[in-house]
Amino acid sequence: MHRVRGCCPAAPPCPCTVPAFFPLLLRCAGLALGLLALLGLGLPLKAAAQPAPLQGLQLQDHRGQALAAQQFTGRPVLLHFVFAGCSRVCPVQVQELKQLHAALPGPVRERVVFLSVTVDPLSDTPAALAAYAQRQDADRPGWRFVSGAPAQVHRLLDRLQVFDPRVAQPVPDDHRNAIYLYAPDGQLLQRFRGEPVDRNRLADELTRLTRTDRTAS
């Protein structure tokens, strides 16, 4: 049987019909937002209840000096994670942060604290981190390379989910390379992508925080 073209025009689609792919599109959008949150592309974290950096922990820096959360009260803190045996991402990130540190205006640099926390405390003793800081030419005022007893360091790693909790036995190379920005009052403000480092954005944020803190005081 031949079908006569044009004799039975197709009915227009109902405007209220939801396309079959729409639920899938919503799921994909949700996954994309989750991935952005995981990577930390400068997303605000004001809703997350996070303690001040190093709150309740007993740690020490590469100079062997004890660190306490109250030492950073009133100062913006930029925190990230490294380990001395890293040969790929960590050295690149440290070099980018070193450029950021050098580019900050003097009054801002004097108030900001950089914390590079090891994810391998068994190997990264204060002496090992001191040698690492020297190799990276990052042993500078206001910049602390942090280690401590494994149990203490792991509390911080768990607090910030530095390793994917779904991985049963992560190795140091598995750590996430996000950068965490803390306000002078100790509140975790934002988590930034660590590769590449958005130096201009971080410089603006640190400058704003130091200016706001001076105005408030």
Image (spheres, grey):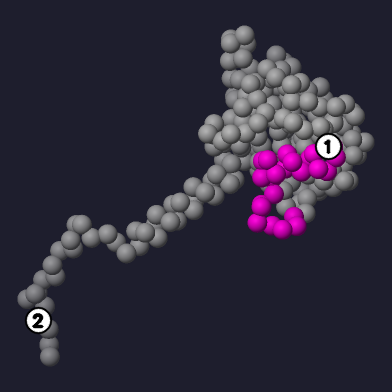
Residue at coordinates 66% horizontally, 45% vertically from top-left? 161
Which residue, as the protein is rendered here, is positioned at the far bottom?
1
Q: Name which quarter of the figure residue 171 lies in.
A: bottom right
| Image x and y of residue 44, in percent | 54, 34
1 or 2: tag closer to the N-terminus:
2
Give the answer, above or below, for where 208 lies relative to 34.
above
Residue at coordinates 10% horizontally, 71% vertically from top-left? 9
Magenta residues span 148-170
Which residue, as the protein is rendered here, is positioned at the far front?
56
Per the image, label 2 sits on a secondary structure element best described as loop
Q: Is any part of residue 102 visible from this angle?
A: no
Per the image, label 1 sits on a secondary structure element best described as strand
Direction from residue 15 to residue 106 in the image, left or right: right
Crowding around mark 2 (Cα neighbors within 10 Å: few <14, some 14 to 19, many 20+) is few
| Marks 1/2: CA–CA distance | 81 Å
Which image quarter holds the N terminus? bottom left
Look at the image and say whether residue 199 sits in the magenta stretch. Answer: no
Residue on which the image places disc 1: 147
Which image quarter holds the C terminus? top right
Crowding around mark 1 (Cα neighbors within 10 Å: few <14, some 14 to 19, many 20+) is many
Residue on which the image places disc 2: 4
Give the answer, above or below, for where 118 lies relative to 173.
above
| Image x and y of residue 120, in percent | 82, 46
Three-letter residue code for mark 1: Ser
Q: Which mark is residue 37?
A: none
